[in-house]
Image (cartoon, rainbow, N blue to C red):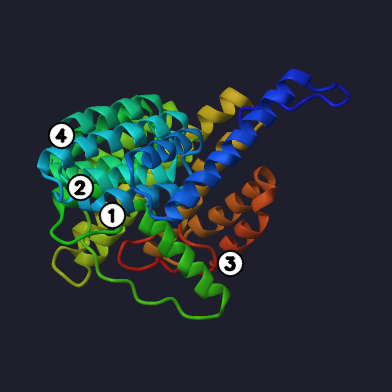
Amino acid sequence: MHGRPRQPQGVPEDTEKVKASQKRIALFSRLTTEVLLRRTAKQYDEESLKLAAKLLEQNPELYTVWNYRREALQDKLQGSDGHEVAQKIAQQEMQVTQAALTRNPKSYSSWHHRKWIIQTHLVPLDAELRLVKQFMQADSRNFHCWSYWRLLVKLMGLSSEEQESYILGRIEDNFSNYSAWHERTRVLQDLNTERPTLSLAELLAADSREQSSSAAGNEPTDAVELQPLPGHVLQQEYELVKNAFYTEPHDQSSWLYLRWLIGNSLAGWEKAKGTPQEASATQVLQATLDDQASMCQEILQMEEQASGLDDRSGQKWPLLTLARLREVQHQLASPSDSNCSEAQQIYHTLIEIDPFRKGYYIDAMHGKAAQVTRSLNSAVNVSS
């Protein structure tokens, strides 16, 4: 188990500790058996629910026992015994889940039960919002917390502006907070587009499907037309993610966010193709790609000065991003430009730095890997 030191080989275990552990296991086993028997018999009395709560405090992942509690309480929570009784039960359930989450803050079953309770509208949501923020202070990357927060703000009707402000604060506290970056892709869509664009998670999932399709020899399916973010918003976001790179250049979450931003820039350019704005859109895209490539090169120089040539592991993400930027620049420029050959050289370097992903980089050299920089509307097809 994580965080538990192993017993050194050859060192006998403490007899008293072994006996205490065996006693706890026996008690837990008897309690589990008793609770499950009561569920089978549909005993929904107070004593049975107390035993179930005690069991869940010891092991919050017993989803069958959470189901037992929902079966026992759903009618009362719907008001069969009056509104005051329903409120009291809801508060008790919140206490049960809080005890479970104190033991395991990443318990799927506990968070699911808590979501079920708040959707009854029997508990004050303001207090819940304060509590979930406390959980995030303890672990800002707990995706269960973020999922719960997302439901809370929806139920409370918090504006996209309020959500964006909170998310930005979490990013500024910790640039490696992948969950916060992902939430930012969602809230920026709500603030700035009439139609949805791809979120960060959806973009990665789309790439996974594209790789599977390519491996099977199938043609990639047409992507749904999606709305890119406005140019002025993208410029602000490029500055934000740039600060993350100079603070934590080794963390992949901000590099993946950059990929999403470039996908927006590509989508804006594609949207302008065939219109009077095409020339200016192409200039804007080329300037964006040049700026991001220059930033990657600057970060690579900083990494080389900090770690030397003996340890180049910290160069992986700026190198990979630079390679894909060069591929897109090659597509925009004349066939004779040097960007494509530079991308090929970078992939060879990545094989040396990151040999465990050698096959991926070889596929990338042949245009078979998922694109790190791709449009939101369609993949950027680059052939070697």
Q: Residue at x 58, y 29 (%)?
A: 304
Badge count? 4
Upstream in the sequence, badge 4 or badge 2? 2
Could you tell me if residue 1 is visible in this image?
A: no
Upstream in the sequence, badge 2 or badge 3? 2
Disc 3 marks which residue? 366
Upstream in the sequence, badge 1 or badge 3? 1
Question: Judging from the image, what secondary structure is the residue with disc 1 in?
Answer: helix
Rounded to the nearest whole Å, what is the CA distance between mark 2 and mark 1?
Answer: 49 Å
- Dot 3 crowding, Cα within 10 Å, few <14, some 14–19, many 20+: few
Viewport quadrant of the C terminus: bottom right
Viewport quadrant of the N terminus: top right
Q: Residue at x 50, y 33 (%)?
A: 58
Disc 4 marks which residue? 124
Rounded to the nearest whole Å, what is the CA distance between mark 1 and mark 4?
Answer: 42 Å
The amino acid type found where label 1 is placed reads Ser
Rounded to the nearest whole Å, what is the CA distance between mark 4 and mark 2?
Answer: 15 Å
Disc 2 marks which residue? 77
Q: Is residue 93 placed above or below 372 in the rendered structure?
A: above
Rounded to the nearest whole Å, what is the CA distance between mark 4 and mark 3?
Answer: 56 Å
Query: Which is closer to the viewer, label 1 or label 4?
Result: 4
Disc 1 marks which residue? 265
Rounded to the nearest whole Å, what is the CA distance between mark 2 and mark 3?
Answer: 59 Å
- Dot 1 crowding, Cα within 10 Å, few <14, some 14–19, many 20+: many
Upstream in the sequence, badge 4 or badge 3? 4
Query: Which is closer to the viewer, label 4 or label 2?
Result: 2
Q: Residue at x 23, y 27 (%)?
A: 130
